[in-house]
Amino acid sequence: MPEIVVLNRYYYKSGVFCIQSEKEIPITWYRMSLAIEEKQGNGHGVASKYGKLSVLAGLQGHHEESAPWLIKPVVAFLRCNDPHGERRDTLNFLMMVRRAPEDVQAKLVAIWRDAGLGELPEASPQQSSAGTEP
């Protein structure tokens, strides 16, 4: 893996000095944190970082790209017996589906089902506000 050094909005990767947009900065930090969590074998930390990366991608309108990233932590939190993490990322997935264009919503629900998670649960308005926390 190439060495990545991030200094504010600038980073150095494989001999190239690059500038990041404001939207790319958190993604870079979460990806670096994800790499550390994976290297340490911290399944709970990996699940958390996937969830955060997915929320950021979803907020930027990349719904189909975001969906598999958000399903990974739901499955991992179920395995870790962490109902809070599973519920939070399920609600985040529901919010992403609602925010997606209509033609994409059916694809997102299919991705959820294909992951073996059954039917996408409904959320009450109170639960919906308890979701995202990138």
Image (cartoon, rainbow, N blue to C red):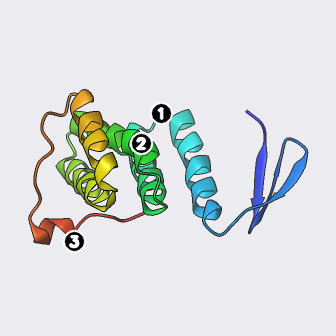
Q: Position of residue 94 (x, y in %)?
A: 23, 54
The residue beneath circle 3 is 129
Image quarter of the C terminus: bottom left
Q: Amino acid at mark 3?
A: Ser
Crowd class of label 2 (few under 14; some 14 to 19; many from 20; radius 10 Å) = many
Residue 76's quadrant in the figure? top left
Q: Position of residue 125 (x, y in %)?
A: 12, 70
Numbered label attached to residue 69: 2
Crowd class of label 3 (few under 14; some 14 to 19; many from 20; radius 10 Å) = few
Q: Amino acid at mark 2?
A: Trp
Numbered label attached to residue 98: none
Q: Earlier in the sequence, mark 2 or mark 1?
A: 1
Q: Amino acid at mark 1?
A: Gly
Outermost residue to the front: 103
Query: Which residue is found at the position 19% from the left and 52% from the top?
Result: 87
Q: Earlier in the sequence, mark 2 or mark 3?
A: 2
Q: Secondary structure at mark 1?
A: loop
The residue beneath circle 1 is 41
Q: Position of residue 129 (x, y in %)?
A: 22, 71
Real-space Cα separation, disc 3 to disc 1, in angstroms: 31 Å
Query: Which residue is found at the position 60% from the left and 65% from the top?
Result: 23
Crowd class of label 1 (few under 14; some 14 to 19; many from 20; radius 10 Å) = few
Q: Earlier in the sequence, mark 3 or mark 1?
A: 1
Q: Secondary structure at mark 3?
A: loop
